[in-house]
Image (cartoon, helix red, strand yellow):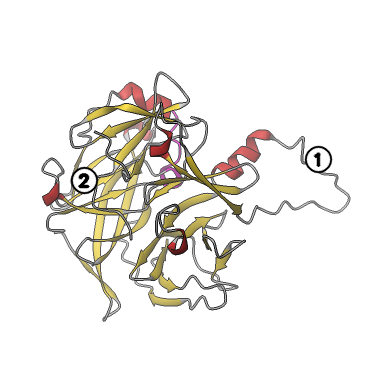
Amino acid sequence: MQRYNQVPILFIPCEEDEHLWTMYDIMDNKFLESKINVSYDQRFCASSEGWLVAVNKDYTVSLYNPYSMLVGNCNTYNIQLPSLFPPQVYIPPGVEYDLENDSEDESEEDFDFHIFKATITADPLENPNDCTIVVIFGEYFRLAFIRLGKDNTWTKVGGHRVWGAFDDILSYNNHFYAIDRDGEFISFDVDPDNLNVKSITSENLRTRVTYSKRYLVKLCRGDILQVERYLTWGVNNERIITEKFNVVKLDLEQQRWIGTKDLGDESLFLGDNSSISISTSNFVFCQRNCIYFTHDLDLVGSNEGGFIDIGIYNIETDTSTLHFNIDSSTFTKMFRRAPIWVVPTINLY
């Protein structure tokens, strides 16, 4: 059961120590005193169910419970998963290839950006028998999954069917959904012997020609949303920033999307994390009908110079603000290591 009943914490690289990450509480607009002791140079490519996901140099996948890595905590929890379809290196006939002396930078680039999104269906320690990890990975943004305690290898979704590059994945009512960058919305099962891949709708709702990214979110009341994030070049074309969000709701019976400007008392949290909705009625300082967004590294890129695309977007008024009380100099430490939302699994106060 997914734990979306708490406001996510924003994890931000620490300015003073490159091996620490700080935690920012958006409700009180302040950094928490506790810090997470993890390697700064490791890119966390996703978060889900309160766990962080990272790819190692050998393309194995690690799940980290960051709240077990609080400074001063002796018990840390991480889970190692098998290698996730490493990219194949083509070596022309007659050409010798020295893997050990291959460019370190290129190798790092490959593994560090091998996963672009992940969702975890249940806490891997509390409910390992119900835990499935689904990822978007690789150069062509494909789908794969592994069931904890059941599978020894990853399974690709889609077979020989050529889908577009996938943007997001969603677990909902024991079914899995994904959407690609052309608006193809599919469902599939996580059974290696029967993937049961189905196309639900291919309706492309893009309203402008620009950089964009699609997200899938399940509201607390049960509706499935597709959120499209439009980006534009900022002042002097120095960086890419979020310009607008477009929100539509799925009519599953009619297999079509319907526009909406009102999420009621709910708000969304989008970025490299598994997309989240919360009911703001439980959290007085959390703004309703808004999208809390962070830098999305596979979409926005690294924005050299330290600028991070982050803020709060009001769906009704189509306006956004930074809002967070974070010094701009903090962003200079975030090159290639962007902030990421993580759902709390312990009481941090």
x and y, in percent, of residue 246 in the image: 25, 57
Against 85, residue 15 (above or below) is above
Q: Which mark is residue 313?
A: 2
- Mark sitting on residue 98: 1
* 263 magenta-colored: no
Q: Amino acid at mark 1?
A: Asp
166 displayed left or right of 57: left
- Secondary element type, mark 2: strand
- Residue 342 in the image: state x and y as whole percent: 34, 43
Q: Which residues are magenta?
A: 297-305
Residue situated in front as seen by the camera: 207 or 11:
11
Q: Say which residue appears at 30% left-offset and 78% top-offset.
A: 255
65 vs 90: above or below: above
The answer for how far apart the CA atoms under marks 2 and 1 are is 49 Å
- 60 or 138, which is in the foreground? 60
Q: Vertically, is 314 above or below 209? A: above
Q: Residue furthest front?
A: 74
In percent of the image, x 23 and y 67: which residue is there?
Answer: 223
Q: Residues within 10 Å of mark 2 (few under 14, many from 20)?
A: many
Evaluate whether residue 346 shows in this view.
yes
Looking at the rendered image, the quarter that the C terminus falls into is: top left
Could you tell me which secondary element the residue under label 1 belongs to? Answer: loop
Q: Earlier in the sequence, mark 2 or mark 1?
A: 1
Query: Going 50% across and 44% down the picture, which residue do you hit?
Result: 78
Q: Is residue 87 left or right of residue 261?
A: right
